[in-house]
Amino acid sequence: HVQLVESGGGSVQAGGSLRLSCSIEGYTPRSWCMGWGRQAPGKEREGIATIDSAGKTSYSDSVKGRFTISQDNAKTNLYLQMNSLKSEDTAMYYCALAVCVAPAQALAVLTDGRPEYTTWGQGTQVTVS
């Protein structure tokens, strides 16, 4: 059983930065990618960044060039550095694991969100004003 616990959310002004962290407890198959998703008010949850066990990454167009996903060597902590934040980045942010053929494919898996293919944390709120 895997447990994901996010931290680092908060309120920030537009143009500012935040760094989210996710603590991962339990066995994580190497065939799974780690990632981040978010859900804005009134919108569906979407995958925004993924990373595989080799460190290859993929990003949604909405965050590409502004957000950076990373993991520690032990693969027990996942991070999301968010720069140049915009008001439209306001959302609940979730740490996630997804069945993974490639990080780009894992973005779609996160957006689809099927429970048999994904595991999610409880989320941390990010508000940009």
Image (cartoon, grey):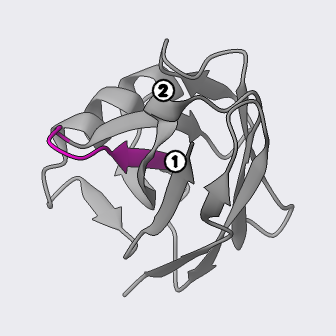
Q: Nearer the viewer, residue 121 or 10?
A: 10
Q: Quadrant of residue 55?
A: top right
The amino acid type found where label 1 is placed reads Gly
Q: Is residue 43 magenta?
A: yes
Q: Quadrant of residue 110?
A: top left
Q: Which mark is residue 35?
A: 1
Question: Height in image: 98 above or below 103?
Answer: below
Reading the chain from its start, which is encountered first: label 2 or label 1? 1
Q: What residue appears at the point 75 percent right and 51 percent down from the top-left corner?
A: 18
Camera-nearest label, 2 or 1:
1
Image quadrant for the C terminus?
A: top right
Q: Secondary structure at mark 2?
A: loop
Q: Is residue 72 magenta?
A: no
x and y, in percent, of residue 26 in the image: 52, 86
Which residue is tagged 2?
102
x and y, in percent, of residue 9 in the image: 61, 65
Q: Residues within 10 Å of mark 1 (few under 14, many from 20)?
A: many
x and y, in percent, of residue 62 in the image: 49, 17
* 72 horizontally vs 105: left or right: right
Question: Which span is picked out in magenta?
Answer: 35-44
* 57 horizontally vs 99: left or right: right
CA separation in Å, label 2 and label 1 = 12 Å
Q: Nearer the viewer, residue 36 or 1?
A: 36
The amino acid type found where label 2 is placed reads Ala
**Is residue 24 visible in this depiction of the protein?**
yes
Q: Residues within 10 Å of mark 2 (few under 14, many from 20)?
A: some
Q: What residue appears at the point 54 percent right and 35 percent down from the top-left corner?
A: 49
**Is residue 34 visible in this depiction of the protein?**
no
* 4 horizontally vs 39: left or right: right
